[in-house]
Amino acid sequence: MDKSNTQDYIHNDILSSEENQDIDSYISVENLLKKQFEEDEFFIDNLLPKGSLCLLSSRPKAGKTNLALQMATCLATGKLFLGKKTEKSKVLFISLELNQKQMKKRIINTLNHYQISDTNFKKFPLVFRFSSEEKGIEALEKELRFLRERYNITFDVIFIDTYVLFKDINKDAIARHKSVYELESEYLAKLRKFCEKNNVSIVLIYHNRKAQAFSGDITENIMGSTGIAGAVNEIFLLERKTGQDKAVLITTGHTIEEEEIELQFQKGLFKLLTGTEKEFRIAEKIIDYLKQVKEATKTEIHKYLKEIGETRSKGEAFEILDKFDIENNQAGFWKCSIEKRSRGKPVKKYSLSFSESVSNAVEEKQGSLLEDGYIENLEKLINEGDEAVDF
């Protein structure tokens, strides 16, 4: 076969030549592998990259504004956010949903949580903007340019609550007979370019679909066009049912690793669910289940845990079982028996190993740790940093 006459053959030597400026948007594998790129930089380690467009989404009343306020406060002070290091940054929080009175109550709660009481707020690098008269990308660019040129004020991170109230996809754009997907993609592409050009990160606060359990696909739970989920750099999906204290922050994106962060929501604030607290909670659920059914296989226990939304990992649940058996110097909270079958493999079944109130034993064990201050200090270490800990 004559390679010069087939489209299947690519002249990489031509693409590698610096003289061919008319095709400079192409690059050969050889040249791509030779390229050196700078390491990704973050405002929040492995969560908020610099120059990125991010989406923080949840169902209504799940606490996304509260979580965004915590993120903004940690960025402004350089405190740990959910156990992750932050780079002290200048933050603008555009609130188009809550008014000043509502926001004041929430920010006071947040500042108290992080024990920020004696700061000189004249120099505090977190600023709010409430006006919704001017909205959209062009208005934001104009406003930021004015602040920079007139007052030498710049921002590193901008929160927009909410994206629906901010965007100005006008009638002219809609009249061009483009699909919602195309309009959203083009609009968010402009915001992405703005982030990259100014090395500023924007966090858009948005809504999940109502009354829908997490499907396993993070993009399917975000309300509206898939163009929104596909056009941003990173996605933070907050899952919490109204009235419940348990929550999960699911993260994914172009730069950050996929992660599921288990949280507790108490008094309007999110905290990391520490390993110890999580283990006690799951152990108590397993104990309650075994008290009901007397004995169960691993598969049955895991199925029950999934039904009540406690864990997605079978291995995780039984690591906790093993840990409690090792740490308990009695016979253990549970025992494993092997039921032999005439055909097939033997089946392991778990049951409680003694009849007294196991739940009370767990509470006593947890109480001793609380008395020692272990859990409290661990929580402070994770949520507030080593300065707050006194072991």
Image (cartoon, rainbow, N blue to C red):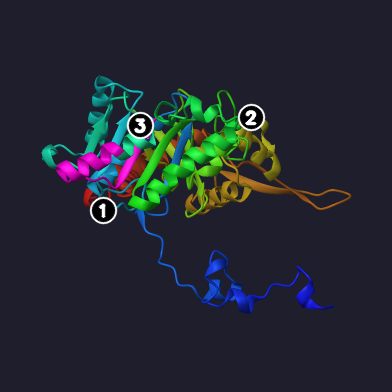
User: Residue 220: x and y, percent?
Assistant: 61, 35
- Residue 12 in view, yes or no: yes
Tell me which label, 2 or 3, sits earlier in the chain: 3
> In the image, is 327 to the left or to the right of 112?
right
Q: Magenta residues, as a range?
A: 142-161
Q: The residue tagged with tag 1: helix, strand or loop?
A: helix
Tell me, yes or no, whether the highlighted magenta stretch contains residue 299.
no
Q: Tell me the kind of residue under disc 2.
A: Gln
- For this rendering, which residue is in front, 52 or 30? 30
Q: In which quadrant of the rendered image does the N terminus lie?
A: bottom right
Q: Position of residue 349 (x, y in %)?
A: 70, 44
Q: Is residue 348 above or below residue 240?
A: below
Q: Residue at x 65, y 39 (%)?
A: 301
Q: Is residue 88 left or right of residue 194?
A: left
- In 3D space, how far apart are the residues under numbered discs 3 and 1 (Cα atoms)? 23 Å
Give the residue type that dot 3 points to. Asn
Nearer the observer: mark 2 or 3; the answer is 3
Hey, which quadrant is residue 9 in on the image?
bottom right
Q: Which residue is mark 1?
A: 386
Q: Amino acid at mark 1?
A: Asp
Residue 50, visible in the rendered structure: no
Specify the farthest residue to the front: 22
Question: Relative to the observer, which residue lies in front, 49 or 170?
Answer: 170
Could you tell me residue 109's position as x and y percent? 26, 30
- Mark 2, Cα crowd under 10 Å, few <14 / some 14-19 / many 20+, is few
Mark 3 or 1, nearer chain start? 3
- Residue drawn at x 70%, y 43% is 299
Q: Which residue is mark 2?
A: 292
Task: Check disc 3 and report the residue beneath it.
Answer: 66
Q: Position of residue 265 (x, y in %)?
A: 40, 32
Which of discs 3 and 1 lies nearer the camera? The answer is 3
